[in-house]
Amino acid sequence: MSMVSFVPLTKLRPFKDNWRVQVKCLHSWKQNTPFAGDTFEMGNKIHATSKRSLMLRIQRLLPIDSWGVIEHASRTAANGQYRTTNYKYKMVIGDDAVLSSSSLVDDRIFLSLANYGEVENGTKKQNFLIDVIGRIHELGAVQTVQVSGEDRKRVQFRLVDAEGDNLACCLWGTYAKQFEPFSDAGRDQIIICLIKFAKIKEFRGEMQITNAFDASRLYLNAIIPEVTDLTQRLSNDNLTVAMIDKPTGKKDCKRVTYNWNDAEIKTISEVVEVNQVEICKIICTIESIDTDWSWFYIGCNRHQKRVNKICNIDYGEMTKKDKPMFRCELCRANISNVGPK
């Protein structure tokens, strides 16, 4: 009897189960619906599910981060919320499916990293789970909060990418517990956080990254090429971690940190005569602001993004009694909490 050759995931179609694929299990978890897992082959990901009664058998024959062979699995249309891939089909591993080990060796974790800008402006759809990586900034303490009458761990922080863009993050339960060793000991080190299968959620007018129940995977300073590359890029920019209590609003994380106590105080005339790059401090008073040129814009104090004025009152004539209103597309509301950026 001839052996059936391997089929790429992109060729899988419903109404047929005589497929043979070689895949890597990226993650598996339990939820109210049957056992679910994610597999990867030839650069394409597919979501896989099975009945609870088959869960232990599948986990034994196809453990996480290992390669295996699946035969006679069916395909159905993928839909609903919190989908792990954008592939239009999902794999159903039934009673008649045959699973076996594979000799293939490939240690990659096959990331599909999301763009921060697409997450923040809402381009990324919230019904898909994403992979996101960044440097931890403004790491708060791991707290115990009441949720539906139960105590749950929670940690809040921001993720910063190599371009300085940042996203709000809030992790719960066992994911938050993994940050406890960094609460005090990690204040002077760079912490690179990678979250696989993270959920996008809107919270108080801002897009936020959080764990998708038990479906997410968290890596802190993992020894993988993606983390090493980001660490190197951040170290070249002389960026350091700032672990402080979560402030109101969103700060600019592009700045390079120096020890300003070591900087020499110079006058403006001395700065004008300088012909090389150096660090110095200037102590001065602003006399006036030139508004004839568009060197600044009015932005939302929460998102630091440009807003559009929706009334006829000049910004310079703003009073406590009569404030102009602005439209912020990220807040999706009319706001007055704005300032020059």
Image: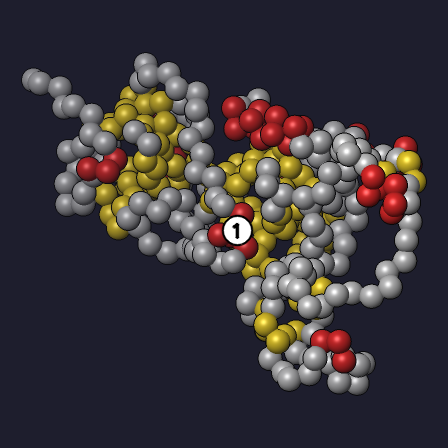
Q: Is residue 92 left or right of residue 114?
A: left
> What is the three-letter code of the residue carrying label 1?
Gly
Q: On screen, 322 above or below 142?
A: below
State the residue at coordinates (87%, 47%): 268
State the residue at coordinates (37%, 56%): 80
Q: Kindly identify which residue carries mark 1.
A: 117
Q: Is residue 65 left or right of residue 261?
A: left
Name of the residue lying farthest toward the front: 273
Name of the residue lying farthest toward the top: 103
Residue 278 in sight in this render: yes
Considering depth in this image, is 194 or 162 the residue closer to the camera? 162
Task: Using the rendered view, name the quadrant where residue 247 is placed.
Answer: bottom right
Residue 139 at what x, y percent from top left? 73, 43
Q: On screen, 243 above or below 59?
A: below
The image quadrant where one finds the C terminus is bottom right
Residue 233 at what x, y percent from top left? 60, 30
Residue 23 at what x, y percent from top left? 32, 28
Task: Using the rendered view, name the quadrant where residue 290 is placed.
Answer: bottom right
Name of the residue lying farthest toward the left: 1
Q: Is residue 50 left or right of residue 209?
A: left
Residue 149 in sight in this render: no
SS state under label 1: helix
Q: How is the image coloured?
A: secondary structure
Q: Is residue 98 left or right of residue 4?
A: right
Considering depth in this image, is 109 or 295 the residue closer to the camera? 295
Label 1: how many Cα within 10 Å (few below 14, some 14–19, many 20+) = few
Task: Using the rendered view, name the quadrant where residue 69 is placed.
Answer: top left
The image quadrant where one finds the N terminus is top left
State the residue at coordinates (67%, 61%): 296
Residue 167 at what x, y percent from top left? 61, 49
